[in-house]
Amino acid sequence: MKCSLNPSQTVNAKTGKKSKTCAIDMAWKEMNDERIGRDLDIDENRTYLNVWMEGSTEDDVAQIVQNKIDEINQIRKENGKRSLRKDAVSVVEIIEKPNIEYMSDLPYEEKVGFLNTSHNVMKELLNDWNPNWTILESVQHHDEFGGLSAHNHTLIMLTTVDDNGLPGMNAFKEVNLKFYSFINKNYPKMMREYGYDVEDVRTYDMLTEEEKMERKLNPKEHGVDSFTYKKRKKEEMSQQLDELKVKQEQMHKELEKTVLEITQAPDLDSYHKIQDENQALKEELSIKDKIIQKLNVEKKDLKQNLEKWKNRCVQIANKIGNKVLNAIGLDMNEVGIRKELPSKEVIQVIDDTSHTIKYDSNNLRVIPDSRNKGKFCVILKKENGFDIIDNNFDSRQLAEHRVKEIIDLKLEINPIKETLKMNMDS
């Protein structure tokens, strides 16, 4: 993912879509040990297991990038060239995420070893592609999805040099289909040289015309975000567990049938034949039982993570008092939750957010604040005008981030209500 200190707000005239460039500070806060993000699979009790390979969680990445941009602009100015654009893509975020099935079978030490090797391979490939690039930060995350989804997370500063030998940052020229093809073709080959059985990647240029058309018609089947990926894996693991239980029951019935046939065998040869078949079934059943035991342990871990989240919701509810619970439609007088007066800071947050969940998010807009020049505000569009929801934002991006918070709150409030109700009933 491409990142910038000041992501572009321009909307593509042809597609009507805004730039997907991410703010560097947002990417960094989710990556470092603060782990500030929307991913509920992050277990902060496991964050100490994360391994820093480049940089440190204490670094000020935004300032490091700004210092480099200032240095580049000074050189360009001295040579009569214009400075970099404020919305220039200066950093690219790379995530190396092996599939969960492979990583879940490895003990922690072997996961660390695999990810260290993967990082060194990626580091070598990036240097071959452009030796001017700088790896700012790189960390192994072992605190997501119960530790099963271990992966590498890296931030790279895209320093380039133009034909005149002057420094710049040209992500459009450097991060393209040729770059993806270079990485995908060479990464599996180099990992196999280190003894890992990594399959080759068929890049887009290797596909047949029929395969390319199929990808265009079904794009979601060929690339999903982290949340969707892990959600699907949970569903797959649950389905596999159910299927194994069914097979186990079938094998027990077959075993009983075999025993019955043994007792009724007409001769010794038939008896030995049935006995051999019975032994093969027992061995297969033993393997299946081990798989089921492993999946049961993994399922238990996932349930424990979910229970931690539920308990956290209740703890938050007890701390902030009845006011926020009433704001999401729960009457604490009916369930007997003890009342605690929230702090002034929490009351302010409640006052700012409790009423927003009633808004129709389709009617939220960001416009310049006519009463405060240079500022932006969030409004709720109505038939005969609009209401100002929030104001005094220094940029349109901050105001749009506020709209996103309101929408996210609406999306997340119902699961929280159900979680609180479940804990109250128990």
Image (cartoon, rainbow, N blue to C red):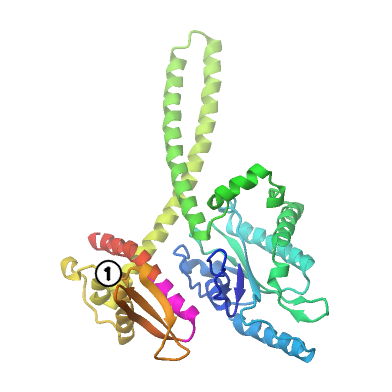
Residue 387 location (% of width, % of height): 32, 79
Q: Would you name the residue on which mark 1 appears? A: 328
In the image, taking residue 39 as reference, residue 12 lies left or right, namely: right
Q: Quadrant of the C terminus?
A: bottom left
Of the pair 342 and 88, the residue shown nearer to us: 88
In screen coordinates, is 90 left or right of 360? right
- Examine the rendered structure and indicate whether residue 291 appears above or below residue 88: above
Q: Residue at x 74, y 54 (%)?
A: 185
Instruction: Give left or right: position of 402 versus 317.
Output: right
Residue furthest out toward the top: 266
The kind of secondary structure element at disc 1 is loop
How many other residues sit within 10 Å of disc 1, few (<14), some (14-19) or many (≥20)? some
**Whole-percent x, y for residue 198 in the image:** 69, 50
Picture residue at 52% right of the left edge, 28% below the top: 281
Which residues are the magenta region?
Answer: 394-406
- Check the image and name the residue furthest to the right: 164
As for residue 404 lying within the magenta part, the answer is yes
> The disc labelled 1 sits on which kind of residue?
Ile
Q: Tell me where residue 35 appears, x and y as whole percent.
A: 50, 72
Relative depth, front residue between 163 and 259: 163
Residue 172 in which image quadrant: bottom right
Q: Nearer the viewer, residue 379 or 223?
A: 379
Seen from this angle, which residue lies furthest front? 384
The residue at 72%/62% (across/down) is 179
Residue 343 lies left or right of residue 28; in this view the side is left
Task: Determine if residue 101 is in view.
Answer: no
